[in-house]
Image (cartoon, grey):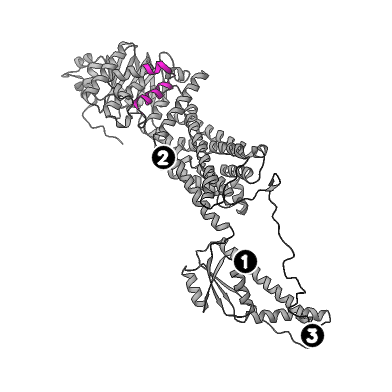
């Protein structure tokens, strides 16, 4: 589904590459986790795959299409749930979703039906007509997720979809993502919640300094790492204990 | 495909409308402040430029002459209805009061001005008559040197140049008239005629008549409202740059623009929605300001605005001026990164464009270089088009050049915004 070849990104004025000569293949129907410490290059990689950033070098295809030649087709094919809430605070949840759904070309009854269904699944139906400025972090995250999946994308990119939310909201989000995956959506997601990734992802890649350190099925990675009991142990073993502060 | 774009454009427009309607404070500022601005400016300017009947400027006068000329000056100043004459005993006293800012102006009439003027005039008249051989003892009298007399004017340093010039011109004219009358009188006296009998007509022979454009054989008389409504309406229309560019920057900062960039919608469609809504705002602003001019101004003692037969053309000008302002706002919003950048920059830019456009000072009195620059200010094109319709009573064809420039400006700014956005976010 996603084929990445020698993809690199170096920001203007930066000394180091944020993503360096990265090769990656994500199969259709996978839930693929991109894990790594802060500044590892996860968000940069997702930004390139979703047309937000121009790669310095390298290529990639999604569903055999590349962005240069099939920009609008690809945009219709993918869904994005950014780390920021990316909502209009003075619009209601319904109005936000109606607008973002319209931008995918969905209209009329189909759009309304899709919004209502998703709001119901996410437990937000009774808040449909409330302004999102009044929502809690968990509620905003759920609306943020719905905005990226209204058009039933074939590939869904999620950047830290459960960051800063309570356990209840996190469960609803993860359950719905699993449901979408069962319906055929390929998911690529980044997270710092390694326990969550361990049970949620079919495969993960641990990235550091813009390069993939290790990649595989979570249980296999744990088994292959000496003295590792979980994915966090693997993560620390591969990326070290040093703080990754950067500015 | 076309239908899909229209659907997205409509959705963008609807969203922009909702965003605007949810910001009641913002709407109030958008509509109330321009009206307030118009009323205040017109009130101030109306009292400045109309024939002053109810406002008298207090002027200090020191009469060291106490003769016929000073009496003439005092009488003329009093009759002008513009000044309230307050006599002071000494020049020093008057000077101090004016330089302290208590009064705008002090006039000091020099000692023996009347006698010196009379002597000078008599000397000149006698000189002329002797040339004609009418003066019997002309060769025997040696010419006395009469020193030049100066009427001193003290102005408060804070007084504006235009006020100073008009006062100086007025006094100069008055003194010239007194001199002329003295010359005529001297001639009359030398010719041995009775001074009370009027043989010379001292009134101005050359008069001025102002010819104004006519409509249905009636002269269109411009007043302060006819000047102010278009000028300040245009100023208000261009102020749309500030909220519009902030709106765009907000989209970037709150992350919604990032989401839009990942969606199958082009930037032109996003800008299109904003253009439609803010153009509506401009036209509502314009309507409200016209209503203020037509109904509120007469109610508060200001001259009303006459829009008879001009409304369609006025709306055409407002529409294209609005487009130009929106184009500039969208370009600024596209380039700027923060609200702190765009708000002061946008506001200052509007003030500069207004100054260049001739909103405050007419373009023809600007230095040549500034006149050239003003020609590239969209506010100048809009103002000229408004004046064409409001004051020059022209047809649609005559305003075509100006509205074409406004439209071109809109298209150019939008094009630059789209290209800039593409170059910044190209994948």
Q: Secondary structure at mark 3?
A: loop
**Residue B46: x %, y % from top left:** 55, 55
Gap between marks 3 and 1 measured at Cα: 37 Å
* Residue B170 numbered mark, or none: 1
Secondary structure, magenta segment, majority class: helix
Gap between marks 2 and 1 measured at Cα: 48 Å
Q: Which residue is mark 2?
A: B26
**Residue A148: x %, y % from top left:** 36, 21
Q: Which residues are magenta?
A: A90-113
Judging from the image, mark 1 belongs to the subunit labelled: B
Q: Which residue is mark 3?
A: B138
Q: Indicate whether B269 appears above or below B244.
A: above
Q: Earlier in the sequence, mark 3 or mark 1?
A: 3
Residue beneath the point at 44% across and 21% down: B264
Nearer to us: label 3 or label 2: 2
Nearer to us: label 3 or label 1: 1
Camera-nearest residue between B279 and B332: B279
Q: Is residue A143 visible?
A: yes
Q: Residues within 10 Å of mark 2 (few under 14, many from 20)?
A: few
Camera-nearest residue between B145 and B307: B307
Tell me whether marks 3 and 2 sit on the same chain.
yes
């Amino acid at each position: 589904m996603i084929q990445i070849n020698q993809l690199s990104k170096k920001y203007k004025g930066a000394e180091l590459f944020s993503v360096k000569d990265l090769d990656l293949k994500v199969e259709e129907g996978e839930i693929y986790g991109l894990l790594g410490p802060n500044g590892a290059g996860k968000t940069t990689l997702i930004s390139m795959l979703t047309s937000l950033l121009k790669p310095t070098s390298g290529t990639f295809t999604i569903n055999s299409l590349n962005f240069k030649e099939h920009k609008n087709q690809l945009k219709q094919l993918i869904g994005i749930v950014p780390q920021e809430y990316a909502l209009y605070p003075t619009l209601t949840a319904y109005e936000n979703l109606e607008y973002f759904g319209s931008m995918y070309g969905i209209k009329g009854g189909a759009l309304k039906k899709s919004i209502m269904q998703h709001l119901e699944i996410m437990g937000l139906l009774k808040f449909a007509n409330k302004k999102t400025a009044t929502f809690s972090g968990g509620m905003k995250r759920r609306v943020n997720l719905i905005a990226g999946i209204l058009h039933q994308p074939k590939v869904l990119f999620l950047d830290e979809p459960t960051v800063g939310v309570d356990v209840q909201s996190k469960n609803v989000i993860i359950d719905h993502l699993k449901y979408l995956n069962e319906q055929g959506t390929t998911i690529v997601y980044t997270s710092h919640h390694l326990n969550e990734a361990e049970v949620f992802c079919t495969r993960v890649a641990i990235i550091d300094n813009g390069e993939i350190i290790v990649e595989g099925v979570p249980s296999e990675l744990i088994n292959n790492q000496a003295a590792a009991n979980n994915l966090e142990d693997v993560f620390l073993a591969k990326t070290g204990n040093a703080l990754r502060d950067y500015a | 495909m076309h239908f899909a774009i229209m659907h997205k454009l409509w959705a963008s427009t609807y969203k922009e409308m909702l965003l605007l309607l949810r910001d009641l404070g913002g709407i109030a500022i958008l509509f109330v402040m321009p009206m307030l601005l118009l009323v205040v400016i017109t009130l101030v300017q109306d009292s400045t430029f109309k024939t002053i009947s109810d406002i008298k400027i207090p002027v200090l006068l020191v009469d060291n002459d106490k003769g016929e000329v000073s009496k003439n000056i005092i009488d003329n100043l009093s009759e002008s209805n513009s000044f309230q004459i307050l006599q002071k005993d000494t020049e020093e006293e008057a000077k101090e009061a004016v330089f302290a800012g208590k009064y705008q102006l002090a006039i000091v009439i020099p000692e023996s001005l009347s006698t010196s003027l009379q002597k000078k005039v008599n000397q000149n008249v006698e000189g002329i008559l002797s040339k004609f051989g009418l003066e019997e003892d002309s060769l025997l009298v040696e010419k006395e040197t009469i020193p030049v007399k100066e009427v001193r004017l003290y102005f408060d340093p804070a007084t504006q140049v235009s006020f100073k010039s008009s006062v100086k011109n007025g006094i100069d004219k008055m003194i010239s008239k007194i001199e002329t009358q003295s010359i005529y009188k001297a001639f009359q006296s030398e010719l041995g005629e009775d001074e009370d009998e009027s043989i010379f007509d001292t009134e101005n022979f050359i008069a001025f008549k102002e010819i104004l454009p006519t409509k249905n054989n009636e002269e269109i008389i411009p007043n302060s409202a006819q000047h102010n409504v278009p000028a300040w309406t245009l100023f208000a229309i261009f102020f749309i740059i500030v909220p519009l560019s902030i709106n765009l920057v907000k989209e970037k900062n709150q992350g919604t623009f990032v989401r839009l960039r990942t969606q199958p919608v082009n930037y032109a469609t996003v800008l299109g929605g904003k253009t439609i809504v803010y153009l509506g705002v401009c036209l509502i602003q314009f309507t409200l300001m016209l209503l203020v001019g037509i109904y509120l101004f007469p109610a508060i003692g200001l001259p009303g605005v006459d829009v008879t037969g001009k409304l369609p053309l006025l709306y055409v000008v407002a529409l294209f001026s609005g487009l130009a302002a929106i184009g500039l706002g969208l370009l600024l919003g596209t380039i700027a990164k923060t609200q702190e950048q765009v708000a002061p920059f946008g506001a200052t830019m509007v003030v500069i464009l207004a100054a260049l456009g001739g909103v405050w000072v007419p373009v023809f009195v600007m230095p040549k270089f500034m006149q050239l620059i003003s020609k590239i200010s969209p506010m100048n094109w809009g103002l000229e088009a408004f004046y064409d319709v409001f004051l020059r009573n022209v047809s649609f064809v005559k305003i075509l050049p100006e509205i074409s420039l406004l439209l071109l400006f809109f298209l150019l700014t939008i094009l630059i915004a789209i290209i800039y956005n593409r170059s910044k976010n190209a994948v």
